[in-house]
Amino acid sequence: MILAIETSCDDSSAAIVSQAGEVISSTVSSQHEIHREFQGIVPELASRRHCELINIILKETVRTAKIDWAELTAVAVTRGPGLIGSLLVGMTAAKAISLRFSLPLIPVNHIEAHAYSAELEHPVNYPYISLVASGGHTMIFLIESADSYQVLGQTRDDAAGEAYDKVARMLKLGYPGGPVIEQAAQQGNPRSIPLPRPTLTGERRWNWRMDNYDFSFSGLKTAVYYHLKNNPRTNPADLAAAFQQAANDCLVYKTITAAEKHNIPRITIGGGVTANRNLQESFGRQCAQRSIELYIPSNRYCTDNAAMIGHRARNLPPVTDYRMNAEANLKLTPSS
């Protein structure tokens, strides 16, 4: 059994995953209440909270799994990317456990784990297209096998989740941006305010043109800013709905186009932004029209969690050099 630890940002999480991929136990503690007053994550506060919680989280995860520490076969941990202070808490804990119980130590790339996260609950056949949309990253992968993938596109500036947070702040809706914009948008009209679909061109919806699979959300965020500046009495619900629809159109269109261009009838999505119900429904409609299989993790596996780290670790080698450390800007290692 693999003990997995995830502390890349503001969620403290641990899980135990069997060699067959079953999640035996999973514990996640969110820090939203701490960071809400700042309308964003404060790195120093995040790392301090991880320090306070890590031992509690680990003990609770082992207790609920009803196993003894001696039954563990490996320890996996997020090496990066993420906030360096937060990453170091998890890495230090993992190294200590590895040395104490003579367990192999398996470092995992956080974004890779998201890309494969749908496999936690669904038997997805290879190859498939995977969209990862979170607070820090927005990427499209071609997943070829358990140990082979390609990056087809990524954001050039803001990630989707980052844009959600910034727009929520402009609209004074609160934090985190994803849930509060989704809630406000339910009362708004997404077609009442015209907003751009950055990197997509053309006037007819779902007949756009695009040059590549990269994303850009900075221009969309700026369009919201100027609309508010020029129309201060705008209904926040309408603007939230228009923004949500514009962002989701970009995510859905490019992911589905990637599947069609590569002749791959399977798509998975993961990352905190993909917990958005409007996004999931848009994917569902468009995939159904094209006979594309769609796999969506439960919301608990869309957001940051250690279970996906344990799942990914099952197909990765352990390290032998304990001088290996966390990397805030850890790069992906796609197949050549």
Image (cartoon, rainbow, N blue to C red):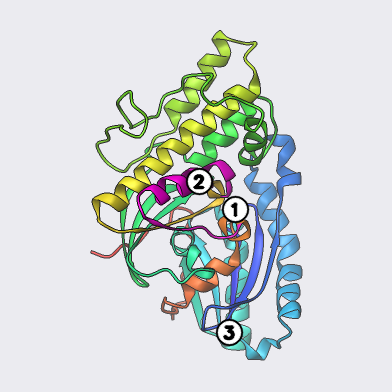
Residue 335 quadrant: bottom left
The residues colored magenta run 275-298
Which of the marked residues, 3 or 2, is nearer the chain's N terminus? 3
| Residue type (three-letter) at the residue carrying disc 3 | Met
Q: Position of residue 116 (x, y in %)?
A: 45, 64
Asked whether the beta carbons under mark 2 and mark 1 sit within 8 Å of each other, the answer is: yes
| Residue type (three-letter) at the residue carrying disc 1 | Cys
Mark drawn on residue 1: 3
Q: CA distance from mark 3 to mark 1?
A: 25 Å
Residue 63 versus residue 101: which sits nearer the camera?
Answer: 63
Mark drawn on residue 136: 2
- Camera sees residue 158: no
> What residue appears at the point 56 percent right and 12 percent down from the top-left corner?
229
| Quarter that holds the C terminus | bottom left
Q: Which residue is mark 1?
A: 9
Q: Position of residue 74 (x, y in %)?
A: 55, 83
Which mark is in front, 3 or 1? 3
> What residue appears at the point 64 percent right and 22 percent down from the top-left corner?
236
Identity of the residue furthest to the bottom in this view: 70
Badge 3, how many Cα within 10 Å: few under 14, some, many 20+?
A: many
Classify 101 as above or below 93.
below
Q: Position of residue 191 (x, y in %)?
A: 51, 23
Badge 2, how many Cα within 10 Å: few under 14, some, many 20+?
A: some
